[in-house]
Amino acid sequence: MAGVRIRRACVGLALLVVLAGLFLSGCTAGGERGEKAEVLVINVGKGDAILVKTRGRAYLIDAAKAERWGMVQSMLKQEGVTSLNGVFLTHTDKDHAGGLTPLAQSGIEVGAWYASGYCLDYGHGEKHPAVQAAALRGREVTWLYAGDGVDGLFDVLAPFVAATDKDDNNSLVMMLNAGGGKVLLAGDMEFPEEEALLNSGAALGCDILKVANHADNDTMSEAFANAARPKLALISTDPYEKTGTPDAGLLSRLEAVGTQVYRTDFTEAGLRATLEAGGAKVESVSWNARPARCETVSISEIDVAGDRLTLRNAGGEAVALDGWYLYSSRGGEFFAFPAGTQLSAGASATVGGRSAGTVDFLWDEKRVIHKSKEDVLTLYDSWGRAVSSVAANG
């Protein structure tokens, strides 16, 4: 699919209308008077999934790994979000893009799909994860470049040119203007894209910064820290998944410009940053009424040749599998159980690919379990917690 490309010139009239409305209503430059903007960085480990809510609208920036979809899904439900005005993919790394297909397969409405205009591996082709997700909804992707804008809220600052080294440097970098302030959303950009951004002359000053690339040592130069000077910085990482993050040098450079730093790995469910009347604050987010992990349902058998697996409920009560899913590590295949699915006490159910013959649940993939190489099949509950995991060919 060719998709759509927005340029600043195409939205100039809309921008003039917005500016006129702001003037007539006596609003601040950062948004409508009294409005609030919330940026919720979900704790998905080393990955990004960021929910933005403002002016009665909701957006998701990245969707984490496919296997972390339950965490994203549960947070959207906890926040009362059943419809997203837009979904942005900053770049195609799996810890940002993996959850797009599960999102597209869910019942959550999506108004528009956006992605960085440059991509190292997929271009704008059908294998691009945003293209695949949008196609499941019969939609196309809007490709974004420096100078574009979205909904009078997001100014696209980068990318400028296609990076040929790493897709991190093709990251979509945006400035959110809302709540009387600014939030710089930096994707996974590393020093090369950061330098291009500095050289562009773009205004980088912000109240809140979503630190790039999980605060690794390949981003946040002294020059960039001085240009942005955020009051608050949000880091989405897990040092057990990505050793050395957050980088000590990066933290010291933020400290030198007076920035308060917050980390998702110090929270249960994530970080909520709020901008209101130009004031910024951050609070930790916890899960509401999360039940204990189910101990009775497991993957009881794997048939590699038959490309199927069996689930068994060894407990004395039926278990609702709404929101539960299976993930295959070798090929990254994802299967979500249909709404209303229950596994009765003492019962078993089979799940298999297209060649598996008669099964209780069709995992609609040509091949799910690798025939010869190690493939780990994991069952997750609706909260993104691993319930059972079995290695095939290990």
Image (cartoon, rainbow, N blue to C red):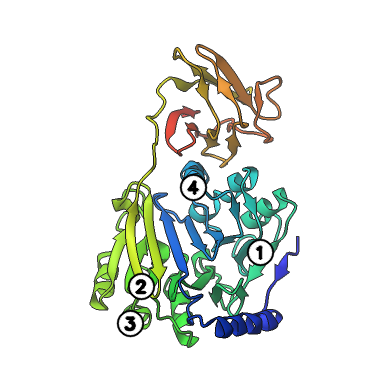
Q: Position of residue 106 (x, y in %)?
A: 62, 43
Q: Residue at x 59, y 51 (%)?
A: 100
For the residue marked with disc 2, what is the amino acid?
Gly
Earlier in the chain: of badge 4 and badge 2, it is 4
Of circles 1 and 2, the one toward us is: 2
Q: Residue at x 70, y 19 (%)?
A: 358
Residue at which label 1 appears: 123
Q: Position of residue 244 (x, y in %)?
A: 29, 58
For the residue marked with disc 1, what is the amino acid?
Gly
Q: Is residue 372 left or right of residue 217?
A: right
Residue at which label 3 appears: 226
Mark 2: few, some, or many residues within 10 Å (few <14, many ≥20)?
few
- Please say if 130 is above or below 345: below
Q: CA distance from mark 2 to mark 3?
A: 20 Å
Earlier in the chain: of badge 2 and badge 3, it is 3
Mark 3: few, some, or many residues within 10 Å (few <14, many ≥20)?
some
Residue at which label 2 appears: 279
Of circles 4 and 2, the one toward us is: 2
Mark 1: few, some, or many residues within 10 Å (few <14, many ≥20)?
few
Q: Residue at x 47, y 69 (%)?
A: 35
For the residue marked with disc 3, what is the amino acid?
Asn
Of circles 3 and 1, the one toward us is: 3
Find numbered disc 2 in the image and state the secondary structure of the residue it sits on: strand
Q: CA distance from mark 1 to mark 2?
A: 40 Å
Find numbered disc 4 in the image and state the secondary structure of the residue it sits on: helix
For the residue marked with disc 4, what is the amino acid?
Val
Residue at which label 4 appears: 72
Q: Is residue 346 left or right of residue 104?
A: left
Earlier in the chain: of badge 3 and badge 1, it is 1
Q: Quadrant of the N terminus?
A: bottom right
Q: Is residue 30 left or right of residue 117?
A: left
